[in-house]
Image: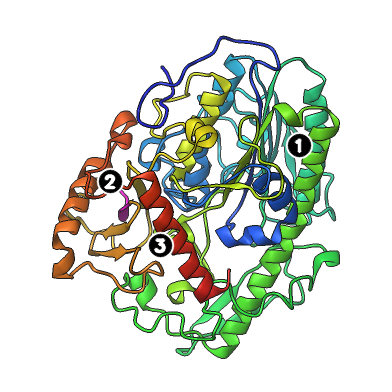
Amino acid sequence: MEVPAEGGQPARIEPRGAKGARPNIVVVMADDMRVNDVRFAPNLRRLVARRGLTFRNSFSPYPLCCPARASFFTGVYAHRHRVLSHKLPWGYQTFDDSRTLATSLAEVGYQTGFIGKYLNGYGTHDSLVSGEPSWQYVPQGWSDWRAAFTNRALPEVHGGTHHYRDTPYNVNGTVDNAYRGRYQPAVVGDFSRAMARRFSRSRRPFFMSVNYVTPHHGSPRELDDPGYVPDRNGRRTDYVTPGRPRWVRGRFDRLITHAAGLPRNGGPAERNVSDKPALLRKFPEPTARERRAMREVTRQRAEAVFAMDVQIGGLIDTLRRTGEWRRTVFMFTSDNGYFLGEHRRRQGKLLGHEPSLRVPFLVTGPGMRGDGRAGRMRSDPITTIDVSATIIDLAGAAPPLVPDGASKVRVMRRGDRGWRTPVLYEALHTGPSDPAPGFDDERTAIGVRTARYSMLVYRDGGELYDLVKDPLQNHSRWDDPAYREVKQTLRQVWRDLKDCAGQECRAALPRSLAAGAGANRRMTAAYWRRLDRVYGW
């Protein structure tokens, strides 16, 4: 089984070799990080973006941590791996991790290391593969395993995955609970640097999956957290924040004058949400107090990202000092994006609108590096499952499952090729679950994203956006007669894509929906200019 390259052609698989024949691969994944949060990460900008590539159209097809991470490790959409939510009856207990990136890379001689957050429910649920409690379970393929976990039933274990100051770890099958009072991202950073040093002593190449909980909200509560704030209708929202160390607090207070997803001029979040799903229609315009709360959330998230970035800089420095950096492909991304005021959504993810669907993706490595003054941009789309296919391609490995994504190695090394295949969006718990045409399983939302259009279909309706004319997605064209033909074409793509597997997921778009490299670059540049004018990115 070969990993497909962009365009559906199999990539060349090189024979097994020692270090030097295959690159090291290091993937750092944040949690709930927005695309514009990268501005608070100077090490990532200086050491990765300016010396490598920034993908300006990067997406998480199921923008929720648990399904997204399962897609990353398997290379398939959620409707195939069936981890359809972080909530019961799903979560880690439904994840078959007997075949993942780790097993594939181990089979071709890679050292494989995991650090930090795995899937929601890891530590609490039993393993689907072994049937044993997951807090002591090490998935197949990993030569060094250091996973955060939560298990409140074990009297000797305290803290949890989302506790920034008290996190237990499963270290190669043994509980390590000695980090009470330690800032979790600093522990993950220590683990990553030590792992890089250990791996560098071997002649074999290595793969590291380094996973920060930052900037996902977590405990303990801090005195300057916004807490519960009522909206105009008296409905109270808990404005949740990540933990961050004292030395970074207040660092961005002057820079951040408004919530990341609210207009910089103080205008309304969205004047009319009647075209939005019920989950968004219920929200009134935010009050002045809510705006201040969202601004504080934005500031605290920025501080947490900066603290994480310090740790990432330390890892890159270790890779340099050990001589591994020159043969390492280094990637940075997030499991999903995050709302911070857009469409009146105070906080959250899951929905298929741009703030939730988009994630940062930066990469540098052999054949991808710039001169350090200005990094290069790519406008071709890349998704979580494409990242998986790219890793498999770089390693010369066989994919763990028939892949839904395509390798982007050629795009990384040679440049954009255009937006010629659709991006699928899917989710649960977005609205009604009543029977509806085209919905044959538990999903409540399925969408299609192309270079110009975003179509989101629910069991009780849908949304259609022309992102050239409306990049903020403020005016749905679902019922607009002028878009009837576009909608019909997108609906056919939707029907072909929604239950896809393997090559079906990479089928070419109709010519009317595809965009060549030049046209896509122009649309992408205009999109980001518009967002910058409105939000001040």
Q: In the depicted view, which residue is nearer to us: 471 or 227? A: 471
Instruction: Determine contact: label 1, label 3, CB under 8 Å.
Output: no
Is 220 on the left or on the right of 495, as rendered?
right
Magenta-drawn segment:
441-449
Q: CA distance from mark 1 to mark 3?
A: 40 Å
Front residue of 246 and 449: 449
Which residue is tagged 1? 175
Whether residue 218 is visible? no
For label 3, the residue is 353
Q: For the point 31% across and 56% down, which residue is it? A: 444
Q: Position of residue 430 (x, y in %)?
A: 36, 61
Is 148 in front, or is 458? 458
Residue 89, how many percent across, how many down?
43, 47
Q: Residue 276: name its quadrant.
A: bottom left
Residue at which label 2 appears:
441
| Mark pair 2, 3: CA separation | 22 Å
Classify mark 3: helix, strand or loop. Answer: loop
**Residue 120 sits above or below residue 303 on the image:** above
